[in-house]
Amino acid sequence: MRLPLALFLCLSLGLTGCGKEQEAKPRPAALVEASPIAIATFSDDVSAVGTALANEQVVLSAPVTQRITSLNFADGGYVKQGQVIATLAQGQEKAQLAAAQAQALEARQQLDRIKSLKARGFATTATYDQQVAAANAALANAELAKASIGDRVIRAPFSGWASLRTVSVGAIVSAGTPIATISDISRIKLDFTVPETQLSLIRQGQPIRAVSAAWPDRPFTGTIATIDPVVDPATRAVKVRAILPNPDRALKPGMLLTVSVTARQHQSLAAPELAVVGDGEQRSIFVVQDGKAKRTDVRTGLRQNGLVEIVDGVKAGQVVVTDGVVKLTDGVPVRVEGGQARPATPAR
């Protein structure tokens, strides 16, 4: 029985020695990626959603109930300022004009006769004044008939693009019936709202950038033209109007656009987002120092383009771990992939 007991003791001592040898073995350095803290540009941006409006837009309607005798525009066609869009029947009005012009001519001739008689003393002043009033009334009736005819000729108030036609020649339209919509879309008015908390970030003449779902890869640029002087008490927001050039008519009234206004810009230290570790409200990064990862608390700011603004806690040029932070603790040895730190990616 002594031999097995001795053998057991030897094995136990041998295993104990192996355990101590394993515990004494140093921990291998963690392989990480690192880059130096660099300076990047950050901006306070205002984001909103806006609605596109035509530069000028009007709905041309029938002023009276009458039959359409002609339509002089094509669906979606371009019309010039003053161009006749539609004409309504004018037969009765033209007859009234002819009658009024005849009465005006007769009244004028009668006035000339009375004036001649008055000069020779054969007509009184009262008779002369009465005929002057009659001549003026006849002339006014003629002008009224002309205006009535003019109301039946519908013209474009400005140059622009006509809407699709919804009426036809020969149709009898009631007063107020829309005949055509004329839109000047050579430039677009873009209306959007900004919270009053961001009102200090915008101003007239400030450039904006807008993107439409119809043209996701084509940003449209313009400037802020007007800021509503009144804040809506219900939404606590102010309406802002920007002007966007639209030479190729890519933007249409009614479109929804995402608006971005670049306000104040400043430069600050920056680190990649993957380098920042969060613990509640505390933020920290791992600084590579003497081959070890030192956890350092920092104060962060804006996040833009994959970078985090570092307000305080580190200095420019310090190398921080950008990938592999999940396997690090304070003071552990690290080995930078590639043997050297990569330069930080600048903010775009």
Image (cartoon, helix red, strand yellow):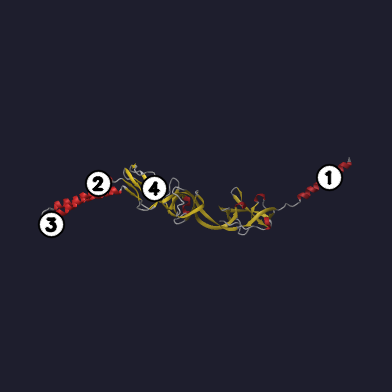
- Quadrant location of the N terminus in the rendered image: top right
Decide: few, some or many residues near mark 4? Use Cα within 10 Å; few <14, some 14-19, many ≥20: some
First of labels 4, 3 by sequence position? 3
> Disc 4 residue type?
Thr
- Can residue 137 be seen in this snapshot? no
Which of the two residues, 10 or 173, is positioned nearer the viewer here? Answer: 173
Residue that label 3 marks: 119
Cα–Cα span, label 3 and label 2: 34 Å
Q: Residue at x 78, y 49 (%)?
A: 20
Name the amino acid, label 2: Gln
Q: Give x and y (percent) for residue 130.
A: 16, 50
Residue 152 at x, y percent in the picture: 31, 47
Residue that mark 2 sits on:
96
- Seen in the image, is 261 located left or right of residue 12? left
- Of the image marks 1 and 2, the number of the one nearer the N terminus: 1
Alpha carbon of mark 1 to alpha carbon of mark 2: how far?
131 Å
> Gap in Å between the C-alphas at discs 1 and 3?
154 Å
In the picture of the structure, the residue carrying the numbered disc 4 is 181
Q: Which residue is mark 1?
A: 11
Nearer to us: label 1 or label 2: 2
Amino acid of disc 1: Leu
Alpha carbon distance from label 4 to label 3: 58 Å
- The quadrant in which residue 170 appears is top left
